[in-house]
Amino acid sequence: MKDLIKQNVQVPTSEEQAIQLLSLLSEIIKYEEQMKKAKKALSKKYNEVEKKIRIYYEAQLAIDKDYTLESDFGRLSKSNKKKWVYEDEKSIINQLEALYPELVKTTKSIDKVKFKEQVMVSDDGTILMETDGGIEVINNVTAKKEESISIKPK
């Protein structure tokens, strides 16, 4: 609500105005869906055209290995790159740890699902954890309650 006030949004003064706004929101969502469908159709057409250009280009490469297709819309050329495939990363890591440990990264992160299961949240959002020595406050994290209102137009 504070965000709406900051944006200088006029709040509907009647139920009728709120219904009109919901209707408008429903129309916007309908147009967004139409745009998604149109984008999908364009993407399909783009892929078809790209496939035809690639077939033509590959045929030209068979004749001239250095062939480049230039147009006002862009340039099509061939480059040679290595494609790396890491089939069993764990075994590679084990091997590198023995040979060159500096090539292996180690990262630490919080298991947030388990963390949330293990802690308690006070009314003010402070995180508490029960330990052998009693209850400990976990610093640098809070969990404040938020209210959420959802609008689901027809």
Image (cartoon, rainbow, N blue to C red):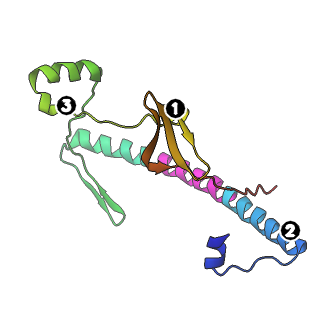
Quadrant (top left, top right, bottom left, bottom right) of the N terminus: bottom right
Residue at (73% x, 57% y) in the render: 149
Query: x, y percentage for residue 51?
Result: 43, 44
Q: How dense is the environment of label 3, judged by Cα within 10 Å: few (below 14), some, or many (20 and up)? A: few
Count of residue discs: 3
Residue at (19% x, 31% y) in the render: 104
* Cα distance in 3D space between marks 2 and 1: 44 Å
Left or right: 103, with 91 as reference point: left
- Proximity of marks 2 and 1: CB atoms separated by less than 8 Å: no
Q: Which residue carries the number 3 mark?
A: 104
Element carrying mark 3:
loop
Q: Is residue 21 magenta?
A: no
Task: Name which quarter of the figure residue 73 lies in.
Answer: bottom left
Q: Which residues are magenta?
A: 34-49
Q: Which mark is residue 118?
A: 1
Query: Mark 2 belongs to which amino acid?
Result: Ile
Q: Which residue carries the number 2 mark?
A: 19
Along the line of sight, the residue nearer the viewer: 36 or 54:
36
* Cα distance in 3D space between marks 3 and 1: 31 Å
Quadrant (top left, top right, bottom left, bottom right) of the C terminus: bottom right
Residue at (76% x, 77% y) in the render: 11
Task: Name which quarter of the figure residue 74 lies in.
Answer: bottom left
Element carrying mark 2:
helix
Along the line of sight, the residue nearer the viewer: 3 or 135:
135
